[in-house]
Amino acid sequence: MGRCKNNAVKEPKAHSLEQAVDVLVEKFPLHLNPEQTLLARSLQMEAAKVWNAACNIHRTIYGRYGYWLSEGSIKALLKGKYGLHSQSVQAVVETYFECCERTRELHLQGHTEWKYPYRRKRFFTVTWKKAAITHKHILHAISANAVRWCLGRSVKTAYIGNPEEVRERDCGRHHNQRMGQWALGKLRDLLAYKLKRHGIELIPVDERGTSGTCPVCGEYTRQTGRVYRCGNASCGFTGIHRDVLGASGILDKAQHGSFTRGRKLPGKVEYLRPQVLAPKRAA
C-alpha cells in the first residue's frame, strides 16, 4: 500500500509539467501456512517466467531486426500461456516496459551506464489488479457451478427461494443495507439463462417459513441461531443447519404446495467452498 508522505503536492518546476511527490511504501507481513507459502512461491516463479519471456522476446527482436516491439504486442504474444490471471500477466509486461522507459530517460540525461532489463529472474512480484476479481465474475462462477451440478444429476426442474418479502422487511439500518446490496436478482437471472440453455426450468418459490418450520411436527418456530431447534415441547427436533432445512422447505413447498410433516431430509450435505488451486504450468 502506498500513500503520500506529505499532504501538499510539490509545485512542478517551470521546465517540467510533471508533479513531484514523495511516496511512502508500507509493507505488511503475511503469516502463511506451508501450503500457502508454496502456492505464493509458485505464483512468483510463474510471474518470473513472464518477465523472462518479455525480456527475451523484446531484446531478440530488437537485436535481430532493429524493431522495438510495443507493449501491446508483447501482451498479445504472452496471452493465455501462463498460470496467472491475464491481468497479472499484463502487469508484469507493464512493469518491464516501465523499466525500459525509465532507462531510456536516464540515457537521454547522460546516464548511459544504466542498462535495459536483461537479467533472468527466478521470482517476481505478482500484481493483483482490481479488474481481475469482480463481483460479476463471482456471480458467473457460482451460477456456472450450479448448472454443472444440475447437469451431472440430470435435473429437469430447479427451484430457487424468492426472498422478496424478507428484503422488504424493516430489520434495522445495517440489516436493511445488507439486503439492499444483495445481488440475488442478478444471480437468479444468470441461473435462469444458463439453465434454460440446457432445457432446465428455474422456478422461484416463496421462502416464508422454510427455515423455521419443523420437518417433523410441522410447527413454525422463530429461530435465532444457525442450527434449527423446534419450539414444540412434544417434538424438540434439532441438529440440522437452518440453510439445509430452508432448502428442504423450498422443495417441499414447490412439490406439495405447503409444508408436510415427517418429510425426508438430506442424508448427506456437501458445502461448496472456495479453495486454493495450484497454478497451471506453461506448456
Image (cartoon, grey):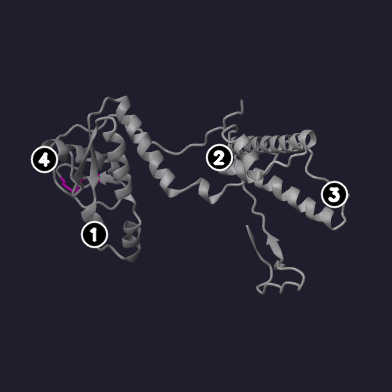
Q: Are marks 4 and 2 in contact (CB under 8 Å)?
A: no
* Figure check: 152 above or below 119: above
In front: 229, or 105? 105
SS class of the residue under badge 4? loop
* Percent x, y of residue 220: 16, 48
Q: Which residue is mark 4?
A: 257
Amino acid carrying mark 4 in the image: Gly
Q: Are marks 4 and 3 in contact (CB under 8 Å)?
A: no
Can I make out residue 39 in this image? no
Q: First in sequence: mark 2 or mark 1?
A: 2
Quarter of the image where one finds residue 266 = top left
- Please tell me which residue is depicted at 70% across the width and 63% down the height of the picture: 23
Q: Which residue is mark 1?
A: 168
Q: Which residue is mark 2?
A: 85
On whether residue 36 falls in the magenta region, the answer is no
Q: First in sequence: mark 4 or mark 1?
A: 1
Amino acid carrying mark 1 in the image: Glu
Q: First in sequence: mark 4 or mark 2?
A: 2
Instruction: Categorize mark 1 by other alpha carbons within 10 Å: few (<14), some (14-19), many (20+).
Output: few
Q: First in sequence: mark 1 or mark 3?
A: 3
- Magenta region: 229-233
* Percent x, y of residue 277: 52, 34
Q: Which residue is mark 3?
A: 114
